[in-house]
Image (cartoon, grey):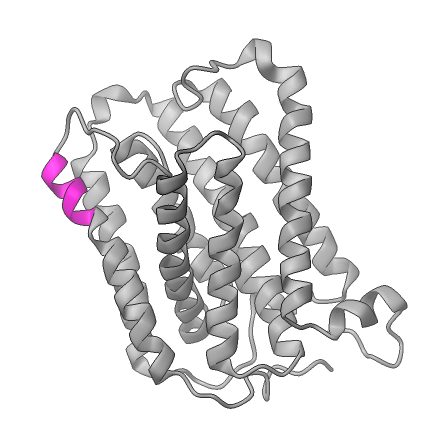
Amino acid sequence: MTDQTTANAWQRFWARGGWWRSILLAAVYLLVYLGISQLIGLFVRPFIDLDDLYGDPASVLLASILPIGLMGLLLLLFARSLGWLPHLFRRRTARAPRWMWIAVVITVVPPVMKLAGTDWSRFTPALVLAILFFGLCVGFAEELLTRGLTVELLEHHGYSERAVYVLSSVVFGLIHLQNLLGGGNPLLVFATVGYAMGFGAMMFLALRVSRWLIVPMLLHALTDPTTLMAAGGINDAHAVVTGGSPALVTFASLFNFVYIAFGIVAVFLLPGRRARALNAPT
């Protein structure tokens, strides 16, 4: 971490943390992401299938992987400019209670079920690899933003662990409002925001119990592509499964409610004391 006696104005500004800086960072992230996506779209539109962006490896690479991959790189450079690397990836916190491992378990189960229920005849090996790599990029960028930088900003301000848990989950949910700009069904988008808050809560618990940011990154990276391949779209909760095992995929989707329910229970189990006693800058 950066020594505050030698930090520059940029580093001191972000080191103060707080909820509004977390919102500011998320808003800037979305604006830059949308700008990059539009800019890339101007150049790659002739090379992608606009009717099925996940129908071939080239479309996935150019329309999905490239924008989110660049955002992950920019976030990494941002964290480096603050002197927060490698601290963000290995947290020096007190050992977490064992009940938090429940979050990891219930996050792993649905992707496994979706893999078993997917109609693999619709996908070539190259397309599967492209979608999985896309998921890895999403997991890296969104977890670095929310469970990495956002959690750090909130802890810097001295919020309790419970408050950091709730606020970081809310920020994660809110960044999914971007789907409204893409013409998404408002009801589905707001449902996605609610689900994302519950899923974000599970990712915070995974971070807290493992103390490694790579854990929620990998869990996230497993969740999105398996949902995409099983149901035909990350944000389409009502997509029709035409092959594989629809029953398995449907049952797996019920875990969305499990995340929300367990997330609410966790609010009352987490301590209200300051979250960063062992995580202070050096």
Residue 73 in magenta? no
Residue 248 in magenta? yes
Outermost residue toward the top in this view: 46
Q: Is residue 15 visible?
A: yes
The percent coordinates of residue 38 (x first, y second) are 64, 26
Compared to 121, does 129 lie above or below?
A: below
Which residue is rendered at x = 52% and y = 14% of the image?
A: 48
Q: Is residue 86 visible?
A: no
The percent coordinates of residue 230 (x first, y second) are 25, 34
Left or right placement of residue 49 versus residue 115 in this view: right
Left or right placement of residue 54 versus residue 214 in this view: left
The percent coordinates of residue 226 (x first, y second) are 31, 40
Left or right placement of residue 206 versus residue 20 in this view: left
Compared to 279, does 248 lie above or below?
A: above
**Which residue is nearer to you in this view: 26 or 122?**
26
Compared to 151, does 38 lie above or below?
A: above
Which residues make up the magenta segment? Answer: 246-252
Left or right placement of residue 193 versus residue 249 in this view: right
Q: Quadrant of residue 67?
A: top right
